[in-house]
C-alpha cells in the first residue's frame, strides 16, 4: 500500500501539492472565521465541589456571566484627596461599556457589601464588575477597553490593576514556536549539510501544524478546548512533524546515494521509514485518545487537539513529503554547506565504537544508567496534583499585580475563596446555621467567614464564603478543604438534616487532581500493556517489549521527578517558572501518552535495525553495534529537534505550557541518551540471544507485523561510481 501511495504522490505531485495548499488555506479561513470559544469546562463524576455547584445552580441564584475586579491601591489611603473622585470617574466610564451589567464600588455607602471591599488599613480596595456573558471572545473588546481606561487613570499616588481571566496577558501565537523552529533549522543543517534538505521537514511540519491548529479552532465549537490547547498542539505537531519528515528524507537521500532513481528512492523511503512513521504516529494518536476514558471534558479537548496535530503531520509525511521529493529529485543536496563533503565511508563510526565500549562493561553501564534514572525519579513520589494560581504569572501581568495587592490587603487566601453550599430543610432550628458558621470559623486555617448568606427569597439554599489563611495553590489550603469536607461540616450538620458541601474553583481543581491521581496508574498500566503487545508482535520477542516498558517507566519517572523539583519544590535551576505550587493535574497523564508514542518511535527505528542485523548474522553483539551505528546519528538529530522545540515553550508565560515544555524536553533527552545509548546496548549484551526468545506456541498465535519492509530494502550494493563524499551513511532502517 505504501509503495502505491509513494508512487502516486510522486507522479501526481502537482495534484497532491495543490490539494494540500487548498486544505491549508481553506481550513485556516474556516478556523479564523468559524472557530469556537476556548473553555475549561469539566464536570466531576461525584464529589463535594460538584455537589456544591449543582446545589447553587438548582437554587436559581447563580450569576450568569463572568466577574472581574478593578483593584486600587493608594499609599495615602483610599480617601486621600482626588483618589476617590478619579476612581469613581473610572468606574462610571466602565459602567457604560457593552456587556457590563453591574458594578459594586468600595465607595458605595448604600451597599452593605462595600465595607468588605476595603482593607483594614484603608489603602487597598477593589470594585466588582459583573459581565453579562461568560464567553471570553465576546468580552475581549470590553476587557481591552477597560485596560485602556485603567492605563489612563493610573498615577503616582494611585495604582490600579485588573483581576480576572479576561484581563490576563496572552502570549502572541507563534512567539515561542519560532524559537523551536529556529533551533530545528540549525540542527537539520548540521544533520543534512544542505539547505534544501533542511527545508523539507520544516515545510512538511508547517503544513501539518497549520491544518491541525485550524482543526483545533473548529473543534472548539463542539468540544471544551482550553485556551492552551492550540499551544500544546503546535508544540507536539512541530516536534513530531519535523521528526517524521527527518527520518523519511534521510532514508530517501541514502537510497539516492546508493544509485537508485528518485522514484525508487521515494518508494523505498515510504516502505521502510514511512511504515515506521505510521506505526509510531498511530501509537501516539491511540494513546492520546485513550484519555477519553477519564471522562473529563476539557481533557478530552486537549487529547483531541494533540492527536489531531499528530495525525495531520503524519499524513503529510507520507503524502505531501513524497510529492515534494518528486520536485526535488537528485537536487536533494543542493546548496550544500562547506562541511557537507566531510563524510566517511566507514561503517565503524563513533556510535559503533561507543556500542563496543558499552558492551565491554555491560553490568557497569546498566547499573549506572538505571541508578541515574532511579535517582532522578525519586522526587516523583512526592508529586502533588492540583492547579496553580495567578501568583505564578510574571509581574508584568496586571492580574499578577492585582493578586499581590489583594493578598497584601486581605490575606493570601482572598484570591481563592471557598464556597460552602448549604441546603436547609424547612423547619430547621434557627440556631443551627450560626453554629455551623462558628464551627467553620474556628477551624484552623480559616481567616474569615462571610454568611450564611441567603441567595434568593423563598429558596432553601444558602452559602458561606470561607477565606483560607493560605493561597489557593498552598498545600495547607488543600488540607483545609479536606478537613472541612470530611470532618467539620459532617460533625456540625449531624442530625439536623442540613447538607453542606465545599465548592468553588479551588476545591473543584483539588478534586480534579485527586480524581486524576487515582486514575493515572490505571491509564499508565493500559498504555504500557498496549506497548508491550505491539512490540511483542513487531519483534517476536518477550524480553524486548519488557525492557521497553521498564525503560519507558524510568524515563517518564525521571521527567516527573524534574517537574516536582522545579515547579513544586522550587529548585528552578534559573528558569522563570513562578512560585512553588502543585503540578497541573492533567499534565502527567498527557505527558505519558505523548512520551510513550515518541519513545516507541525511537524504539522501533533502533530495534528494527538491530533485529534485521541479528536475523542476517545471528551475532547479537555485532547486531547491536551495527544497529546503533546506523541509527544513532539520525535518532540523536531527531531527539535534539524535539528537545529544542519542546524546550522553547519554557520561555512562554503560561505555567501549564512551561510544565509540558520542560517535562517533554527532558523525557525525550533521557530517552535518546541514557536509554537508547546506554541501557539498550548494555541490557541487550547481557541478555544475548535471549533478547529474541519467544515461545513457539505464542509465536503461532501472534500476527506477524513488519515495520521496516523487506530485508532486501536495506542491503542494496553500494554504487562504486559514487564518490566517498556523496555517500550517506545514516540509515534509519
Image: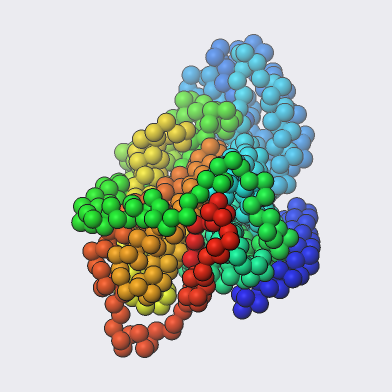
- Whether residue 688 is situated above or below residue 205 in the rendered picture: below
Which of the two residues, 497 or 464, is positioned nearer the viewer here? 464
**Could you tell me which residue is drawn at 63 percent across and 70 percent down?**
264
Which of the two residues, 437 or 117, is positioned nearer the viewer here? 117
**Could you tell me which residue is drawn at 64 percent across and 52 percent down?**
333
**Could you tell me which residue is drawn at 53 percent across and 56 percent down?**
728
**Could you tell me which residue is drawn at 49 percent across and 62 percent down?**
732
The part of the image, by quadrant, that contains residue 311 is bottom right
- Whether residue 429 is situated above or below residue 697 in the rendered picture: above
Which of the two residues, 173 or 199, is positioned nearer the viewer here? 199
Most extreme residue toward the left, as rendered? 363
Which of the two residues, 179 or 495, is positioned nearer the viewer here? 179
Q: Is residue 312 visible?
A: no
Q: Position of residue 109 (x, y in %)?
A: 62, 26
Q: Could you tell me which quadrant the N terminus lies in?
A: bottom right
Q: How is the image coloured?
A: rainbow
Q: Position of residue 464 (x, y in %)?
A: 46, 45
Amino acid at each position: 500500500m505504501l509503495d502505491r501511495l509513494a508512487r502516486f504522490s510522486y507522479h501526481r505531485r502537482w495534484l497532491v501539492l495543490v490539494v494540500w495548499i487548498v486544505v491549508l488555506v481553506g481550513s485556516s479561513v474556516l478556523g479564523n472565521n468559524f472557530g469556537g470559544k476556548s473553555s475549561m469546562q469539566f464536570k466531576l463524576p461525584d464529589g463535594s465541589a460538584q455537589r456544591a455547584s449543582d446545589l447553587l445552580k438548582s437554587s436559581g441564584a447563580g450569576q450568569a456571566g463572568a466577574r472581574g475586579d478593578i483593584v486600587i491601591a493608594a499609599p495615602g489611603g483610599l480617601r486621600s484627596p482626588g483618589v476617590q473622585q478619579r476612581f469613581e470617574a473610572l468606574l462610571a466610564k466602565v459602567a457604560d461599556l457593552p456587556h457590563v451589567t453591574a458594578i459594586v464600588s468600595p465607595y458605595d455607602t448604600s451597599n452593605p457589601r462595600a465595607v468588605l471591599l476595603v482593607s483594614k488599613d484603608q489603602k487597598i480596595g477593589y470594585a466588582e464588575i459583573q459581565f453579562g456573558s461568560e464567553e471570553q471572545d465576546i468580552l475581549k473588546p470590553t476587557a481591552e477597553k477597560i485596560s485602556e481606561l485603567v492605563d489612563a487613570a493610573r498615577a503616582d499616588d494611585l495604582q490600579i490593576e485588573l483581576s480576572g481571566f479576561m484581563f490576563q496577558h496572552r502570549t502572541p501565537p507563534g512567539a515561542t514556536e519560532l524559537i523551536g523552529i529556529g533551533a530545528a533549522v540549525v540542527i537539520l543543517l548540521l544533520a543534512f549539510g544542505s539547505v534544501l534538505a533542511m527545508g523539507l521537514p520544516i515545510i512538511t511540519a508547517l503544513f501539518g501544524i497549520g491544518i491541525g491548529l485550524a482543526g483545533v479552532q473548529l473543534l472548539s465549537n463542539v468540544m471544551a478546548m482550553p485556551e492552551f490547547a492550540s499551544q500544546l498542539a503546535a508544540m507536539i505537531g512541530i516536534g513530531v512533524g519535523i521528526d517524521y519528515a527527518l527520518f523519511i528524507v534521510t532514508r530517501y537521500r541514502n537510497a539516492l546515494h546508493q544509485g537508485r532513481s528518485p522514484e525508487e528512492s521515494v518508494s523505498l523511503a515510504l516502505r521502510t521509514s514511512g511504515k515506521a512513521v505510521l506505526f509510531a504516529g498511530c501509537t501516539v494518536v491511540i494513546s492520546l485518545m485513550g484519555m477519553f476514558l477519564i471522562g473529563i471534558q476539557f481533557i478530552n479537548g486537549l487529547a483531541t487537539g494533540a492527536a489531531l496535530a499528530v495525525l495531520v503531520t503524519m499524513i503529510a509525511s507520507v503524502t505531501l513529503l513524497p510529492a515534494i521529493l518528486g520536485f526535488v529529485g537528485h537536487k536533494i543536496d543542493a546548496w550544500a554547506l562547506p562541511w557537507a563533503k566531510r563524510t566517511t565511508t566507514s561503517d565503524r563510526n563513533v556510535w559503533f565504537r561507543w556500542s563496543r565500549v558499552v558492551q565491554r562493561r555491560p553490568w557497569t553501564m546498566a547499573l549506572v544508567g538505571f541508578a541515574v534514572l532511579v535517582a532522578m525519579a525519586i522526587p516523583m513520589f512526592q508529586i502533588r496534583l492540583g492547579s496553580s494560581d495567578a501568583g505564578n504569572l510574571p509581574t508584568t501581568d496586571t492580574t499578577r499585580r492585582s493578586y499581590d495587592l489583594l493578598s497584601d490587603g486581605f490575606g493570601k487566601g482572598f484570591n481563592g475563596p471557598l464556597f460552602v453550599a448549604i441546603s436547609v430543610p424547612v423547619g430547621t432550628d434557627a440556631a443551627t446555621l450560626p453554629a455551623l458558621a462558628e464551627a467553620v470559623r474556628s477551624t484552623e486555617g480559616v481567616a474569615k467567614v462571610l454568611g450564611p448568606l441567603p441567595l434568593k427569597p423563598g429558596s432553601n439554599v444558602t452559602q458561606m464564603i470561607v477565606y483560607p489563611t493560605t493561597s489557593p495553590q498552598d498545600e495547607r489550603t488543600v488540607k483545609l478543604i479536606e478537613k472541612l469536607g470530611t470532618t467539620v461540616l459532617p460533625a456540625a450538620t449531624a442530625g439536623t438534616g442540613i447538607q453542606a458541601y465545599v465548592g468553588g474553583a479551588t476545591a473543584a481543581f483539588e478534586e480534579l487532581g485527586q480524581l486524576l491521581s487515582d486514575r493515572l496508574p490505571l491509564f499508565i498500566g493500559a498504555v504500557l500493556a498496549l506497548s508491550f503487545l505491539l512490540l511483542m508482535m513487531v519483534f517476536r520477542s518477550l524480553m524486548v517489549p519488557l525492557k521497553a516498558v521498564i525503560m519507558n517507566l524510568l524515563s517518564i519517572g525521571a521527567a516527573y521527578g524534574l517537574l516536582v523539583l522545579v515547579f513544586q519544590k522550587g529548585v528552578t535551576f534559573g528558569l522563570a517558572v513562578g512560585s512553588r505550587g502543585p503540578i497541573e493535574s492533567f499534565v502527567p497523564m498527557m505527558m505519558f501518552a505523548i512520551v510513550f508514542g515518541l519513545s516507541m518511535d525511537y524504539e522501533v527505528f533502533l530495534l528494527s535495525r538491530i533485529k534485521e542485523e541479528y536475523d542476517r548474522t545471528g551475532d547479537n553483539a555485532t547486531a547491536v553495534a551495527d544497529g546503533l551505528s546506523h541509527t544513532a546519528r539520525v535518532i540523536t538529530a531527531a531527539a535534539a529537534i524535539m528537545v529544542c522545540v519542546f524546550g522553547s515553550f519554557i520561555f512562554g508565560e503560561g505555567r501549564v505550557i512551561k510544565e509540558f515544555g520542560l517535562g517533554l524536553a527532558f523525557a525525550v533527552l533521557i530517552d535518546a541518551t541514557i536509554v537508547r545509548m546506554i541501557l539498550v546496548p548494555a541490557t541487550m549484551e547481557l541478555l544475548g540471544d535471549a533478547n529474541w526468545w519467544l515461545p513457539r506456541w505464542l509465536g503461532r498465535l501472534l500476527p506477524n507485523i513488519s515495520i521496516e519492509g523487506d530485508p532486501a530494502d536495506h542491503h542494496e550494493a553500494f554504487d562504486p561510481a559514487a564518490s566517498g563524499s556523496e555517500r550517506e551513511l545514516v540509515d534509519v532502517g
